[in-house]
Structures are given as structure tokens and as C-alpha cells.
Amino acid sequence: MAVLTIEGGKRLSGEVEIHGAKNSALPIFAATFLCNEKCTLQNCPALSDVDASIKILKHLGCKVVREGDQIEIDPTAAHNCTIPDELMREMRSSIVFLGALIAKCGKARISYPGGCELGPRPVDLHILSLQKLGALIDERFGSIRCRRVGRLCGNTINLPLPSVGTTENIILASVTARGITKIHNAAREPEIIDLAGFLNACGAKISGAGDSVITIEGVEKLGGCTHRIISDRIEAATYMAAAAATGGEVLLKKVQPDYVEPVFYAFREAGCELEIGADTILLRAPARLNRIKLIRTQVYPGFPTDAQAPMMAMATVARGTTMFIETIFQNRYRHVDELCRFGANIKVEERVAIVEGVDSLYAAEAQATDLRGGAALVIAALAAHGESKIGNIRHIDRGYAELETDLQALGAHIKRVDY
Ligand code: EPZ
């Protein structure tokens, strides 16, 4: 079992290169299963969720070769259409394999996905949407059995909420369906644009990705392509929050600033200076941060729910009171009790968290509760005086590649210790 030990109180300064986006890579891995030629994905982050996707692809019969951040997937010999329970439980986004499996194999059997515990995370919209495309689905004994008679059939789907995973599943299922599919109230996240970009490069006909109406004109079959995964906007926001919480100055490189923009207002309100380049963001923090009046999480292009916990860690050391409203997930404040171990002053009432900034945090021992909550604890430990220990870091490994190396390069005293 490994823990992170962090000797905090050091100002972060220097440069860091942002990795490829986890939440883009995962649905694109599922999309490669639909292809009829080899695909090469570049800028793939070294994460345990990526390892889990590779395990699923191999289980389905794909050949996968990994060299550094490049992964080659050859789906031409894929034959399997079931994903066993232990692989499904490894991550939430395993559910997007359902759309790809039913489209390619005509039948599929999977169990319910795992992933971060952020309150109830049903898959009802995924199921209803696939049914609208003609899939016959039977949910019994903890498994989802799915089949189709003939090709899936394009349809108009009005989503009651712009679910990211559901939008991805519909795209994957409909890309080779007969006729035209229209998704109304589709998710607009950059990861959707990346998925559509990959599929279009393989011969799909998808338009409108990034807008709330997406049109998919089914094609007979897909080829393959070489595709570069976009950079991770949440990793970028996390490093910005870490730099800000330590009064530091950090240059993010290989970043797509447009996609990070929804968090900029919060850093500026906290008193940070931002200089935005074509693929860089420079953040210069003041010695003491100001409070941010309100952080309300929303779907893209609103403030991302995935950046809520890291920003909360930063707000704990600001001057004044910051209010958070979490509108996406029912229970995404599990990191709060752990942050309070560092001396943070936070009260939670249902979807609202009130953070009273304190002059300084002190070192503590804490346990990561989920991926972004874990990143929040790392930020608190970096800002705190003394040596902190963070356990349960398997959550953090799901979403932050080379975390210790990158933070060390910025001057942090952080190491992974195996017990
Ligand atoms: C994606 O999850 C991301 N995961 C999450 O990132 C992210 O927090 C989330 O989108 C919101 O931006 C991946 O891309 C792998 P949703 P997803 O479907 O697709 C409800 C991280 O830290 N809902 O948009 O699961 C659901 O319960 C992670 O990197 C239904 O009710 O998110 C939630 O309240 C965690 N029924 C809301 O919609 C459904 O069938 C948004 O979920 C599906 C979703």
C-alpha cells in the first residue's frame, strides 16, 4: 500500500506539461473497438483508468501495443462481446463500451460500472437512449444484456439533462446505425468534440459536437486513424489551484486554454494574474488569496464539477468566505471532512459548502475519498506547514499522471512511500 508524504509550505514555481485528457481518452478507447483498421492514439496519459480500458480492449480481442504515450489498437480480430464484472467495476466510463459493443457485435453483456462514489450514478439515460436506437435491453441479476435485430436505427433523442457519458454512448451506437440520429440537449464538453473528431477521422459523419444539437449520419463502416488526445483541462485547473494555494508562479505548457477558460474567473477573483498563450497558461498568485464569492458547478461551459474539490482546497487559505454550490452530483463533498483535518473551516448543507478561509493549514494524515477529492488533499498538504500523509492514493492514480514527478519539478517536497 502506498501513501504520499508531503512536506508542505513550499511555494510552487516553474513549468509543467499537461498530459492528455483522461475523460477524452476513455470514450475514444471504446470507439476504437468500432473500427475496422488499426488506430493510433497519441498523448495517452499513464493512468490506472487507461490501464483498465486497455484490459477491456484486450479482453474483447483487440491487439494493443503501448509505447510511451502512444497506444496502437488493432480491433480487426476482436470477437468478444461481454465485459466481466471485475473489469466493469474498475471505472465508471466502462459503460460507454455498451454503445460500441451493441453497434459492432449485435449483442452485449456487461455488468454495472464502478468509478468514483459521488452519490447515485444511474445509467438509466444510457439504457433509454440505446433503446430509442432499437437496442433490446434486459436488466436482470446485476447485468445488462443487450441485443439488436438488424442494424440499429437512427432516431431523435431529447436528453432530459446533458449527460456526458450518455451523449458519448449515443454517438458510439449511432455512428454505424441506419439513418440519422439527432441528440437534443447533448453534452457540450470538449471531450465530446474530441470523440467526434476521432470518429470523423475514421470515416464517421458527425456534426454539431460542442453544441447542444449533435447530428450523426450513420455510415456502413469505420476505418482507422491516428489521433492526438486533447490535453486535460482538469489536470490544468488542479495545477493552477496548487500553485495558487502556495502563493506560487507556474507556467502550464501543452494546454488548451479555451477549454480551461471556465475556471479563469475564479483565479482572477482570488487575485491571481493569468497570462494566456496559444498553448500555455501562466499563473502568478499573490502572497494571500482573496475569497471567491461563488463557485457554482455547471455543465460545460460552466465551472466544471471536477475542479470543485481542488478549488475548495485553494479557497481554504483565502482571505474571507467562498461559497460552493455543487449542481451536478448529489454527493461530491466527501473530501470536506478530510480537508478539515488540515484545519480548514468548511460547513456543508446539502449541495452548498461554505469555506471560511484560515490564515494557514497544518499538516495532517488524510485519506483520498475519490479522484478529485484526493487531488484536493494534495493541494491542502502542499499549502500546510509540516509533513502530511495521504493514503488511499489509488483514487488519485486514476486521474493524475506523473503527479509526484511534476510537483517535484515545481519545487514540492512530495514522495510516494510503499508500506
Ligand atoms: C463524466 O461522467 C466524467 N467522467 C466525470 O469525471 C465528470 O464529473 C462528469 O462527466 C460531469 O462532467 C468521464 O468522462 C469518464 P454525466 P459521467 O453522465 O459521464 C446523472 C472525474 O473526476 N445521470 O454527465 O458519468 C448523474 O448521476 C469524473 O474525472 C443520470 O441521472 O457524467 C449525474 O448527476 C468523475 N442518469 C449527472 O447526470 C444517467 O443515465 C451528470 O452525469 C447518466 C447520468
Image: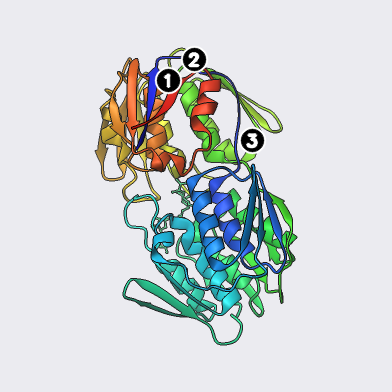
Q: Is residue 359 above or below residue 417?
A: above
- Compare marks 3 and 1 and give the one earlier in the sequence: 3
Name which of mark 3 and mark 2 comes first in the sequence. 3
Q: Which of the 4 quarters of the picture holds residue 38?
A: bottom right
Closer to the eye: label 1 or 2: 2
Amino acid type assigned to the residue bearing label 2 in the image: Pro
- Residue denoted by label 1: 290
Q: Judge from the rendering whether residue 301 lies leftward or rightward of residue 2; answer left or right.
A: right
Q: Which mark is residue 255?
A: 3
Residue ID for mark 2: 286
Query: For mark 2, does the 10 Å Cα neighbourhood hold few (<14), some (14 to 19), or many (20 or more) residues?
Result: some
- Distance of mark 1 from mark 2, alpha carbons? 9 Å
The answer to whether the residue labelled 1 contacts the one labelled 2, judged by CB atoms less than 8 Å apart, is: yes
- Residue nearer the viewer, 129 or 11: 11
Query: Which element is circle 1 on?
Result: loop
Q: Is residue 164 above or below residue 260?
A: below
Quadrant for residue 223, please give it.
bottom right
Residue 45 spot, x, y in % from top left: 58, 43
Q: The C terminus appears in which quarter of the rendering? A: top left
Q: Nearer the viewer, mark 3 or mark 1?
A: 3
Q: 371 or 125: which is nearer to us? A: 371
74 vs 366, left or right, is right
Element at badge 3?
loop
| Label 3 – label 1 distance at C-alpha | 26 Å
Q: Quadrant of ligand 1?
A: bottom left
Tally of numbered discs: 3
